[in-house]
Image (tube, coloured by chain):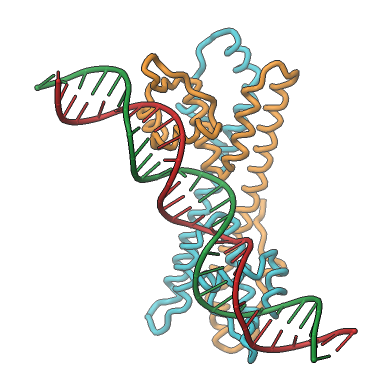
Chain colours: A cyan, B orange, C red, D green
DNA sequence: CCTTGCCTTGAAGTTAACTTCAAGGTTTAT
DNA sequence: ATAAACCTTGAAGTTAACTTCAAGGCAAGG
């Protein structure tokens, strides 16, 4: 599959795909006799993984590190190191999900007390500090 | 409270706070006789809200829009408009949380099938397409 | 009264993650 | 055989969100 088709598959431009290869968030893609990139299933899996993790907020820098781990040869426990990175990223995602739930809880709180707060404010009553004991999510 | 103290309260530099006021993600902060900013509880609540929503990935641009809504006077249903923005942002957060859960499910899948996939790859068996029917989260 | 540590504004600089540009090679269709 | 539509590389440009710089004013201690 050529670079245009690969881009269309994941909603990326050809420029972005070349950029991803150049900085190393995906491994080098093999070329055909004309020097054109020929994306394999394995290359496309890499692109999918990268777009997915990017959409979850992981930085290009951390994806470069992960990709470099796959390129190494003859180190002893390469698989273990990669799995550990995957576990770490999963744990960071868990933290991020928890944080987003807390932010959601704050928005819910602001919505529930909106009229109440506006009324107090218009009556000149003291405003309460939102940042001390902020609302947290349940579950 | 002066700008340095306000920054320390939320882990922001004084430069960032001035930047936030300048671009309008928080309302103008009143000055004392020397021209220094004097942060009120209400100002600090704004800073807290902005840092919280920024940490959840909302753009400066969308926060400027929200802040401008609070500044308007004598339009009819200003409170309703603000509440609608809060509801929209909460709904977008819900979508984002759901998406992060799916990404988490993908990482879990990759971890579970890691050894399996490596073995197949080393045996020269065809690689399966990760992006068709990707794993989704439960609940 | 002078140093130290605050504060002010406006403008220019930085970083991440692309995006666009320039110059040119290949392949396919008319 | 020539135009349209692909592809290549390397370098320069863009945008968001700060950050740093320059030039100077206020306030408290010695």
State the image coordinates of residue B107 (x, y, percent, origin top left): 56, 63
Q: Which image quadrant for residue B85?
A: top right
Please tell me which residue is depicted at 60% across the width and 34% down the height of the picture.
Answer: B64
Q: Which image quarter holds the N terminus of chain B?
A: top left
State the image coordinates of residue B81 (x, y, percent, origin top left): 71, 27
Please tell me which residue is depicted at 54% across the width and 25% down the height of the picture.
Answer: B27
Q: Which image quadrant for residue B61?
A: top right
Residue B94 appears left or right of C27: left
Q: Relative to B100, is D3 above or below?
A: below
Q: Relative to A22, is A123 above or below?
A: above
Please tell me which residue is depicted at 52% across the width and 73% down the height of the picture.
Answer: A22
Q: How many numbered callouts?
A: 0
Q: Relative to B125, is C12 above or below?
A: above
State the image coordinates of residue C15 (x, y, percent, origin top left): 43, 55
State the image coordinates of residue B41 (x, y, percent, origin top left): 47, 20
Please tell me which residue is depicted at 40% across the width and 28% down the height of the picture.
Answer: B6
Determine the residue located farthest toward the top in the rendered image.
A123
């Amino acid at each position: 599959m050529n670079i245009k088709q690969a881009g269309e598959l994941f909603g990326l431009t050809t420029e972005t795909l070349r950029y991803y290869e150049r900085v190393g968030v995906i491994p080098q893609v093999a070329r055909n006799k004309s020097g054109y990139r020929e994306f394999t299933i394995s290359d496309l899996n890499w692109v999918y993984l990268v777009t997915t993790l990017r959409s979850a907020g992981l930085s290009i820098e951390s994806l470069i590190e992960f990709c470099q781990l796959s390129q190494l040869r003859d180190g002893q426990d390469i698989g273990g190191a990669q799995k550990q990175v995957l576990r770490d990223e999963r744990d960071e995602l868990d933290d991020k999900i928890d944080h987003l739930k807390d932010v959601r809880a704050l928005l819910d709180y602001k919505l529930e007390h909106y009229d109440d707060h506006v009324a107090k404010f218009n009556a000149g009553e003291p405003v309460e500090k939102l940042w001390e004991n902020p609302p947290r999510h349940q579950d």
